[in-house]
Image: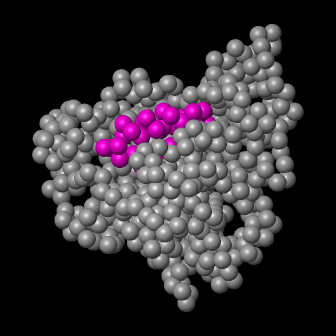
Amino acid sequence: MRLKLSRCKVYDPVQKKNGVIEDIYIENGRIIAPPVDDSAVQQCYDMQEKVVMAGAIDIHSHIGGGKINIARLLLPEQQPHDSIPTTFETGYRYIEMGYTAAFEPAILPINARHAHFEMQDIPMIDTGGYVVLGNDDFFLRLLARNAPQQQINDYVAWVLCATGAMGVKVVNAGGISAFKFNQRQLDIDEKNTYYAVTPRQILHSLATAVYELGLIHPLHVHGSNLGVAGNIETTLSTIAGMQGLPIHLTHIQFHSYDTAGDRGFSSGASRLVEALQKYPEISIDVGQIMFGQTVTTSADTMAQHRHHHHAHPKKWLGMDIECESGCGVVPFRYRDKNFVHALQWIIGLETFLLMDDLWRVCLTTDHPNGAPFTSYPHLIRLLMDRRFRAEQLQRLPADAIAYSQLIDLQREYSLYEIAIVTRAGAAKLLGLHDRGHLAVGAMADITVYSEQEDKEQMFASPDYVFKSGELVVKQGKCINTVQGGLHLIRPEYDIQIEKSLKQYFERYHTVNFTNYPLSLDELQQQNQGEVFIHSTPRRSL
């Protein structure tokens, strides 16, 4: 079926189109070149110069897997609310905001099968995930005995194939493992008590593997010392320590705290941005907090244990996951009258507003850790409307405002810049070449908005959303249910690594080696949508 969207006001940074009025043609789920005439058009939608963008992409959102289910069990009273929506609610809430893809950032290898079942259960949007490494016993043993980088590369590639993942994530490199040996903090150059390796070694080894295997998305890094005053020093040391290797620093707001002032807690956003200007190979997502009730879910048991006494309501859970990682679930309420929470809110916004190169910035709240993803329209308004932002700022404690520069930042994001941080930038960082833009050949994931002064209302309720060329949302409400696809990679590796893994599994694991990996056939059979396998061209340093 051939569709025509006429008189679109297009915002497409990939094509450098900033409010260009043009027609868009769709056939077989993709955007096609304008035909000679419209005789073959079977359906025409007059967009009346409404704002048209590609479908939005969430690069980091906890939508599937063990932690979210544990949070649902721990907090049944929050089920009707946004912080831990069901799989069905997740898909419908995303598509009704104009999002057509979201990526789960923390798939534990042992839980990969379950995570895929969860993501398959999410309707409407494309999904994919990053597998968590860097605290797994097998890898730490390789690193401790100075195994060749090629052997580490083969292991990383095997794990990616075995878990059906799109990228590699490291959470508090070595720190989750160190916590099991009673270490309560692990800085970037501090050795793990048992393995005698440092977070810097772990990060450099995994970043090298990701680069040499040809993954488009760089190593997705949840840094050391999350939430600790002064952790900006750790973050800056991490950036410099990569020695030119690309990494993606996730929920960077939680890692940008300085120690100025009487309370020993202040904004490190300007120092972060200054460093990022020197290292163009580093990208970030912000992890903006919003005031209100949510729940924090993280593999970083070290950080979750450190903060569990702040739980609201007063219950939490921490657990170990085989020999691979950990899990901590702590319900949390961010309060605008709290000095620390107010500064966290400020630091995230400062990071957004100080960055010049928005192609390296993705809009996230680290759902649900900073706030539910349903708060994105409110965050967009804060970025686009400085008067509204100033009104919200004045509600915060005066001493929090004093330790920041947000009050002096007059910048307002444009629609073009919003299209970068919610669409084009994420697609580029993930290697989704036919997403995030509206060029000929792109997947017809399209969102249409009526331009409004209130940008929160505008982005909360698009007029139309098309998924793979099919109209699924009209006037902010879902009118048709479709199944999104699954994005993954299948890098090559030396099969000899499986010999070592089989021996390891026989000695240490409770799961049989043959039952551990997800085959490509299994992924294709269980996924109701299309499976997109992205290429991984090998590179060398």
Residue 201 percent location from the top left of the image? 28, 60
Determine whether, in the image, residue 156 is placed left or right of residue 59.
left
Give the residue displayed 51% in from the left and 77% down from the top. 258
Q: Is residue 213 left or right of residue 60?
A: left
Q: Which quarter of the figure is the N terminus placed in?
A: top right
Asked if the magenta segment contains residue 115, the reply would be yes
Q: Which one is in front, 129 or 297?
A: 297
Q: Residue furthest bottom?
A: 262
Is any atom of residue 352 visible in this view?
A: yes
Residue 380 drawn above or below residue 513: below
Relative to the observer, which residue lies in front, 319 or 22? 319
Instruction: State whether residue 109 is above or below residue 388.
Output: above
> Viewer-proximal residue, 122 or 357?
122
- The outermost residue toward the right is 48
Q: Quadrant of residue 424?
A: top right
Q: Residue at coordinates 83% horizontally, 37% vertically from top-left?
A: 50
The residue drawn where x is 63% and y is 22% is 29
Q: Residue 101: in sight, yes or no?
A: no
Q: Which residues are magenta?
A: 100-128
Question: x, y (%) of residue 119?
Answer: 48, 37
Percent position (x, y) of residue 104? Answer: 48, 45
Find out whether residue 272 is within the magenta segment: no
Left or right of residue 279: residue 12 = right
With respect to residue 482, does 116 lie above or below? below
Question: In which quarter of the view is residue 34 placed?
Answer: top right
Across and down, in percent, residue 174 comes to: 30, 61
